[in-house]
Amino acid sequence: MSTMNILTRRGATTGPRRAARLALLLLVGLTACSGEDSADDLAEAEGAPLVLASTDVAEVETGEIQAGIQITGTLEPAQQVDVKAQVGGTIGSVRYEEGQAVGRGAVMATVTAEGVRSQAAATRAGVGSARAGVSSAEAGVSSAQAGVEAAEAQLALAREQAESAELLYNEGAMSRLDYQAAQAQVEAAQAQLASARAGLTASRGQVTAAQGQVASAQSQATSAGEQAARTVVRSPLSGSVSARTVELGEAVNPGQTLFTVVSTSALELRGQVGVEEVRRVRVGDPVVFQIDGYPGQTFRGSVSRIDPTADPASRQVGVYLRMPNPSGLVGGLFATGTVVSETVADALLVPESAVRTRQTEDGEAATVYVVRDGVIRQQPVGIVQRDEARGVVAIQGEITVGDRVIVAPTTDTVDGARVQLAATRSGADARPSVARESE
């Protein structure tokens, strides 16, 4: 093989190797550059501030906070009555529908009960008959009284005649037989008077009996009249018809519910509290109501009554909170009533969700996350009072009005982290207030 061929062969061999070596060096260079860019991106990402929306923060505000025992439940009308049939029969008329206002004593329906009405008519007739009996008996008394008076006059005459006969007999001017006849007339007149007096007593007894019959008849008539009056169904209170369960012509029985009438002039929240807490509740204590569907509005009332005994099973005591209702709220609304036992004025208020608590050896420790100069600071605070109905907490510590706290801290919320508030459409960060948070 010639020298020229050897050189040519070596040149052909080393060309591809050199190209591969250059490609390898280029790849290493590109990889190094790419690694430097990734490191820069990672460093930049690690230093990026945490972006918070305007709804993620709230300003610390001052305000009044009220605390006490809370009762949650449904507001029901304080007065609710089931209007029931008092006699059996058929519905003759129906005058009210659901939702209509009704006044106290208004006729809501009538029940056709012929037996009841005929009985009332019969007892009224019986009263008339008994009164006629009294009149007849009183006439008998008058007649007997006249008989007594006549018998008394006859006796007086007989005695005069007997005295005259005795004088004549003693003087010998009258026979013994005539004298005895005069004495017999006196005895007969006495017997007649006694009989007349007995008749008078009997007549008076008949009057008394007749008067008793009148009283009995009147009692029966009154009872029958009341029974007949029950065929007219009247509202026992002023309010609204919340339910009607009867139709025209329907047969009803005594005790069957025909209507339900409610008065919403006052609403009542019924609940229970433990026996340990009931000592803090008194009738007349003020109550603050928060009602679902009416955010931001506060309604006031008072404790109307407290059950005298506790439930032996649950050890709970029934408490009733009443709220005047001049605005005409409907019943059935879900509400929370706070029996106010303490009021704190000019308190520092933050949303309840902004406060983080944990148990320590010394008790409960609370903190909030405050945004200051674009940095999150974990700030220890003390809890003064809670208002769960409004969802706010009164705190104290190294915190002032206007400080911005993170409403709901997450795992990304750490002490020392940089934050940035996202701008609103108008370019300003509209932060929610505590009041709006509580709504």
Image (cartoon, rainbow, N blue to C red):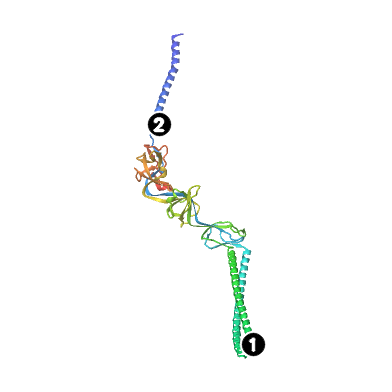
Distance between the Cα atoms at labels 1 and 2? 166 Å
Query: Residue pushed farthest top?
Result: 1
Would residue 296 be visible to someone looking at this image? no
Q: Residues within 10 Å of mark 1 (few under 14, many from 20)?
A: some
- Asked where in the image residue 370 lies, by quadrant, the reply is top left
Asked whether residue 116 appears in the rendered view, the answer is yes
Residue 396's quadrant in the figure? top left
Q: Could you tell whether 89 is left or right of 320 in the image?
A: right
How many labels sit on residues? Answer: 2
In the image, what residue type sits under mark 1? Arg
Query: For mark 2, what is the residue?
Result: 42
Instruction: Left or right? Give the position of 182 relative to 267.
Output: right
Taking depth in this image into account, of 160 and 3 the one nearest to the observer is: 160
Residue 400 circle label: none
Q: Position of residue 209 (x, y in %)?
A: 60, 71
Query: Which residue appears at 41% of the width and 22% of the height?
Result: 25
Residue under pointer 1: 176
Q: Position of residue 230 (x, y in %)?
A: 58, 63
Nearer to me, 62 or 270: 270
Q: Nearer the viewer, residue 48 or 4?
A: 48
Mark nearest the camera among 1 and 2 is 1
Residue kind at label 2, given as amino acid type: Leu
Estimate how packed mark 2 is, as few (under 14), some (14 to 19) or many (20 or more) residues with alpha carbons within 10 Å.
few
On screen, residue 54 above or below 150: above
What is the x, y in percent for residue 169?
A: 61, 88
Indicate the secondary structure of the residue bearing disc 1.
Answer: helix
Outermost right residue: 177
At horizontal 45% and vertical 13% (from top left) the residue drawn is 9
For mark 2, give the secondary structure. Answer: helix
